[in-house]
Amino acid sequence: MMDDTVVITTSAPGSLMLLGEHAVLHGYHALVGAINRRITVQLTQTETDFVRIFSILGEYQAPLNDLVDHSSFGFVIQAIRQQAEHIPTGFDLKIDSDFSSTIGFGSSAAVTVATHAALMAWIMGEEPHRETLFNQSLKTVHEVQKSGSGSDVAASVFGGMVGYTTAPEFHPLELSVPLTAVYCGYKTPTPEVILKVEQMRNEDPAKYERIYATIDASVMEAIDGLRNHDFPAFGEVLNRNQELMDEIGVNTPELQEIVSALQAAPDVFGAKISGSGLGDCAIGVGYADLAGLAYPVHRLEITSAGILYHG
């Protein structure tokens, strides 16, 4: 190994969508939060021309100039492809995660951001501007996923709570907020949910424009409440937006059972579906045990720490 071998370690937080699902895809505001569960990437320069990836999801090896697709590492490989012409040698990439990729905690955005941050810090010799990191990461997500607002990317880059539009426009709030997230046991891929909602929207555009405008106003109301640390007001906004998610058509019996249990918990201010819906997670502001609920319960916090460089 070379005496001056480059080793760069970065980490990015997962995220949860708090408000604005589906509406954000049409230019309206969303509110997303970075959570205290992270994905860490360690990049180690090698003397070869190969890229090797090591993760709990498996291992990968390919020449830097001929990266083949891999179902477990699509976002990472695309990030490398975007930077490949500036990468001087082969390298190893070790990926560790605090949470499962099967739960809707924004793992794809987090690993994309952490990978770009490590590559760009190596290539540039310094930490990239956050807006540049956001743009490169969002490009990767769009290449792989073909859809998505970039809200989760914004949370992984900036941390805290971020009021966001696809313009892009950022309203970061550095707050620590307790959350209870409950996974309903299954999820429908986000592109499938988006397609279904868009089909329903095409059948009744006036209805959905009304819903999205109401959501947009709710986000701004929530941001004002959070700036004043008014969690009860924030919780009320979440409760109202659960009704809107139901009206959009992305609620399920399992999600409604979880939301109702969270809303009834004494230390929870409000609750709703988090993410595109038709499965995945619901969240409540505050901590709840929910011992009688037959679903995995996660106690989380909104964290102010976005992308971090550890060396």
Image: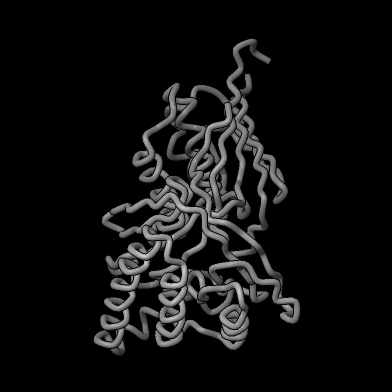
Query: Depth check: 23 or 216 in front?
Result: 216
x then y, percent, for residue 241 = 42, 79
Picture quarter containing residue 127?
A: top left
Extreme residue in the top direction: 3
Query: Could you tell me which residue is drawn at 63 percent across and 53 percent down?
Result: 72
- Residue 139 screen position, x and y as percent: 39, 49
The quarter of the picture where the C terminus appears is top right
| Colour scheme of the rendered structure | one colour
Placement of 105 over or under 271, stated as above or below: above
What residue is rendered at 36% in x and 86% in y?
200
Q: Residue at x 35, y 58 (%)?
A: 163
Q: Give the x, y percent position of residue 297.
A: 68, 69
Quarter holding the N terminus is: top right
162 vs 40, left or right, is: left
**Numbered disc total:** 0
Query: Where residue 179 appears, x then y in whole percent?
Result: 57, 64
Q: Is 194 located above or below residue 158 in the figure? A: below
Q: Which residue appears at 48% of the width and 36% of the height?
A: 117
